[in-house]
Image (cartoon, rainbow, N blue to C red):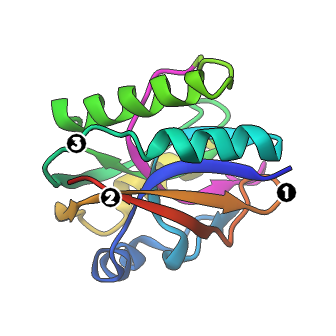
Amino acid sequence: MPRLFTGLAVPPEIAAALQAHRGGLPGARWIEPSDYHVTLRFLGDIDAPTADDFLDLLSEMRPRAPLTVTLEGIGSFGGDRPRALYAAVRPTSELADLQAEQERLVRRAGVAPEKRKFTPHVTLARLKREATPEGVAMYLSQGPVFAALAFIADRVTVFSARESTGGGPYVAEAEFPFA
């Protein structure tokens, strides 16, 4: 069964700039810069026929103009039990519309609806138990100043992941240009 998700690939020059924020947090398992992406819709482990149906449906995406993706700061998910560090993506109506279309296509392919609210981000590190809330707060308050980064996204990429927890390396299985 393939473990699939759709996303926007982060260009190498933006990934290189994000590397300045790696390190200095005990319990962090840093994501390789080549695996940075903005997840639009995680499908999970699905059977091959469902994956094929979804890929066929993606070819029906509405034409759209390229969109600007702006990374505007560093944050963490998990509160008292931090589980990830991320670069926050500025929400835009274009990005929300693209993600909503991904959700509709996934449902048409027979995948269960997503229960979590879409929070656009680029995961920088997965956090183990050694990463305490205090350590994360210190990292966020004393890390390098985050200068906004922007890039143009002009396609949706379907990625596959190996079977593990939060596991790259990710492989680009297919790309679907916007226009």
Q: What residue is shown with label 2?
A: 155
* Closer to the eye: label 2 or 1: 2
Q: Is residue 93 left or right of residue 135?
A: left
The answer to which of marks 3 and 1 sits earlier in the sequence is 3
* Closer to the eye: label 3 or 1: 1
Q: Is residue 118 left or right of residue 46?
A: left
Q: How many labels were placed on the picture?
A: 3
- Picture coordinates of residue 134, whole percent (x, y): 57, 44
Q: Badges 3 and 2: C-beta atoms under 8 Å apart?
A: no
In the picture shown, does residue 72 fall above or below 114? below
Please give the name of the residue rendered at 64% of the width and 68% of the height, measured from the top-left corner.
Answer: 170
* Closer to the eye: label 3 or 2: 2
Q: Residues within 10 Å of mark 3 (few under 14, many from 20)?
A: some
Q: What residue is shown with label 3?
A: 90
Q: What residue is shown with label 1?
A: 163
- Which amino acid, by three-letter code, is at mark 1? Glu
Judge whether residue 173 can be spotted in this image. yes
- Which amino acid, by three-letter code, is at mark 3? Arg
Marks 3 and 2, Cα distance to the nearest angstrom?
A: 18 Å
- Picture coordinates of residue 63, whole percent (x, y): 21, 44
